Image (tube, helix red, strand yellow):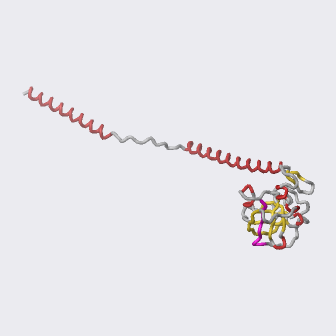
């Protein structure tokens, strides 16, 4: 009887061991998870670093734009020979040459057939702080207006910035153009620039106190 009991006891122990092994195996299989992809989650320091780099690049871009503008201005000034009356000439052309005739057409017969015609509106302005800046007697090309109360005879105009070369336009400071605009028809020298909000527009420089006027259908002729 003891032998039979021992056999049963042994069988039960083996069965328990087997069941335990199977259970452990099942738990081991169930506990295995699918591998997760390696996803980078930026930290707060990472975000701050990227933001700082963006600002550095943006500041550099702005600096390059500023340097380019300053260099254009320096080159333009180096070209000029200034005179005491506020006028100037370019050092890069000779009297009577093509550029001289273009910039000083008032002194020559203006060639109406040689150039482009642009439809513009035209107004007038006084060289005063309220209509210019804190140096109203200095034009955009740095030419000084000798007398703000007696300057209409200079035949100077300002043009909207879309017409100027640095915005892809056909005009440079110092160019002489011909304007069809009622009693103001004639040749004028471009010395100044208007506010950025204006397009296809010109402003006649007038002595302080001149009666106001404007033209909606003026024409601007640019000699080529």
Q: Quadrant of residue 134?
A: bottom right
Give how far across and how far down residue 46 sits, in percent. Answer: 56, 42
Q: Nearer the viewer, residue 26 or 74?
A: 74
State whether the magenta stretch is mostly helix, strand or loop: strand
Give how far across and how far down residue 66 sits, in percent. Answer: 73, 49
Q: Quadrant of residue 2?
A: top left
Quadrant, the N terminus:
top left
Horizontal placement of 221 versus 21: left or right?
right
Horizontal placement of 11 versus 31: left or right?
left
Q: Nearer the viewer, residue 223 or 20?
A: 223
Was residue 21 drawn as part of the magenta stretch in this picture? no
Q: Is residue 133 visible?
A: no
Q: Residue furthest front?
A: 113
Q: Nearer the viewer, residue 28 or 192?
A: 192
At 30% across and 41% down in the image, what residue appears? 30
Horizontal placement of 52 versus 209: left or right?
left
At 20% across and 33% down in the image, what residue appears? 18
Compared to residue 47, the image places residue 5 above or below, namely: above
Which residue range is magenta in the image?
215-224
Q: Residue furthest left?
A: 1
Q: Nearer the viewer, residue 49 or 208?
A: 208
């Amino acid at each position: 009887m003891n032998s039979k009991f021992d056999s049963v006891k042994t069988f039960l122990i083996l069965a328990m061991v087997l069941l335990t092994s199977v259970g452990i195996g099942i738990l081991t299989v169930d506990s295995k998870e699918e591998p997760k992809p390696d996803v980078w989650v930026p930290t707060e320091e990472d975000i701050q670093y990227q933001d700082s780099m963006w600002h550095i690049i943006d500041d550099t871009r702005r600096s390059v734009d500023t340097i380019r503008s300053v260099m254009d201005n320096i080159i333009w000034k180096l070209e000029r020979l200034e005179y005491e009356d506020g006028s100037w000439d370019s050092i890069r052309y000779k009297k009577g040459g093509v550029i001289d005739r273009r910039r000083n057409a008032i002194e020559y017969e203006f060639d109406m057939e040689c150039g482009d015609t642009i439809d513009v509106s035209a107004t007038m302005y006084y060289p005063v702080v309220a209509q210019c800046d804190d140096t109203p007697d200095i034009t955009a090309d740095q030419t000084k207006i000798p007398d703000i109360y007696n300057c209409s005879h200079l035949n100077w105009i300002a043009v909207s910035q879309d017409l100027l070369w640095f915005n892809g336009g056909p005009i440079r400071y110092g160019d002489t153009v011909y304007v069809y605009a009622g009693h103001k028809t004639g040749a004028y020298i471009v010395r100044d620039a208007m506010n950025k909000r204006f397009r296809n527009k010109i402003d006649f420089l007038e002595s302080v106190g001149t009666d106001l006027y404007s033209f909606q259908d003026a024409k601007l002729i640019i000699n080529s």
